Amino acid sequence: MSISAGEIKEMIENSKTFLGIELGSTRIKAVLVDEHHTPIAAGGYDWENQFIDGIWTYSMDEVWQGLQACFQNLCADVKDKYQVLQRTVGALGISGMMHGYLPLDRDGNLLAPFRTWRNTITGEAAEKLTELFQFNIPQRWSVAHLYQAILNEEPHVKDIAFLTTLAGYVHWKLTGQKVMGVGEASGMFPINSQTDDYDEKMLVQFDQLDEVKAFPWKISDILPNVLVAGDPGGVLSEEGANLLDPTGKLEPGIPLCPPEGDAGTGMVATNAIAPRTGNVSAGTSIFAMIVLEKALSKVYPEIDMVTTPAGMPVAMVHTNNGTTDLNAWVELFGEFAELLDVKIGQSRLFETLYQQALKGDADGGDLLAYNTISGEHITHLAEGRPLFLRKPNSKFSLANFMRVHLFASLGAMRIGLDILFDQEQVEIDKILGHGGFFKTEEVGQRMMAAAMKVPVSVMETAGEGGAWGMALLAAFLVQRSGSERFASYLENKVFASAQGATLEPDQADVAGFEVFMKRYKKGLVIEHTAVEAFN
């Protein structure tokens, strides 16, 4: 549908646009969509996590600095394209990196530095809670961080009045509401998909732990209230409007949908929220989300059980390490090009090197790499040690070098997927991909299809990512018809005419990846030794 700049300007002025903001691992992004869900403006702010005193974290000052800069960039884009000031929207939503630990006291003061999903410091707590609940509790989850702080006898725990995630924290500051979308909540504490709320039995089990009984709070008192897609999440307060836009132009009173995690917005952005669908988000971390038809037969420590933003059960294979190591190698090649006085843009640099991977041997030429910048629970690594290995007779070429590093980004995820596809016989009709891994045409799709052994589709809108998915959730809050279900809304009103490209698995690639995975699994002993020896 072709819409003129004048028509878009009228939508902006009449509050018929919707805003999604996502605080991702490396970028805060805002996407504004029109009433037909088409992106019409965007803003961004680049940032990086910090490793301080053994903790992966972001400062709260930079959270607000980044959000404000991102919003101002969006406003500048709107003014440049449509000659209008961005004063309000029909609805907005906040998304962020899932999991982690943000404990606050009664006055709203942060009691400990923000501990992100990337930390692997809660092994004891995660193991004990998994045994207690008979439900897999990953190290990333908020309840694992909470229980580990209790086991560590950290003095701040007694003062906790509110425990939330990054998205929940920002939403609370903007609205005053301590709420959470069910998809994001499912990464804090187990959800009962029949009630779309925290599992009551497990709440009681947690409260009855000897170490927990001593505290003046119950777990249900400090967790956010759970909402599903379409539920109202409050309105932008005057204080919240000034936080997001210190210039004072943004008007309070805007409705907000429930805050969600980046996994949930990824599912929305790829229309993968119905059973037998799935999506894979490939960037700083890589995770596959498979919407289930039935429960798994048993608990697997490699598989997280979460939900869609509408509450459907999802099997999540999450790996902490994605393309960060690969990006570092690309930057190294860029540095070499600069020494030769060769001017090459970052996009072309990535595209040129990624495309070389298609020219490599199917198995990567008997090379081996591990992309572990941080710890990785699926491969039982408490810390990361990026490695590249070759034998004297390995086929050491640029094409094989790039191919094996793309393969390595998917290695840990494949171990988890083998459980779903081989042991649990989970069946899916399609996988949709989004994230930086897919930016170069064909390459990421082809590598992913080889790893997952199913067709991989990438929509034209995949580049907009989770911020666009969050904008769709905001639009659903206002534009749904009566009791319309979110899956139907997406299928009929957002993706009915969506364009995309699908790649079937190439059998030579599949066979090559199988050879690589045998090498990858066998070589994990080298990676574990590197953690011990190179400290």
Image (tube, rainbow, N blue to C red):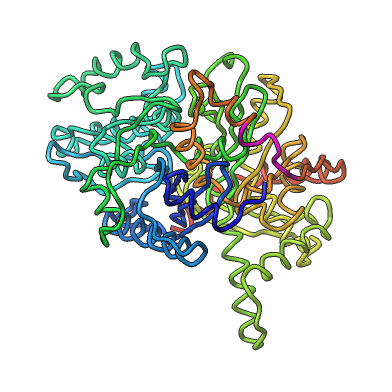
Drawn side of residue 286 relative to residue 531, left or right: right
Q: Which percent across, then down, holds residue 105? A: 15, 38
Report the predominant secondary structure element of the magenta stretch. Answer: loop
Quadrant of the rendered structure where residue 234 is? top left
In the rendered image, residue 496 lying in the magenta stretch gets the answer: yes
Q: Which percent across, then down, holds residue 16? A: 46, 43
Relative depth, front residue between 246 and 381: 246
Relative depth, front residue between 188 and 30: 30
Relative depth, front residue between 370 and 304: 304
The residue depicted at 83 percent of the width and 51 percent of the height is: 362
In the rendered image, residue 524 lying in the magenta stretch gets the answer: no
The residue depicted at 27 percent of the width and 46 percent of the height is: 252
Q: Quadrant of the C terminus?
A: bottom left
* Residue placed furthest toward the bottom: 341
Q: Which residues are magenta?
A: 493-500
Q: Which percent across, then down, holds residue 505? A: 81, 40
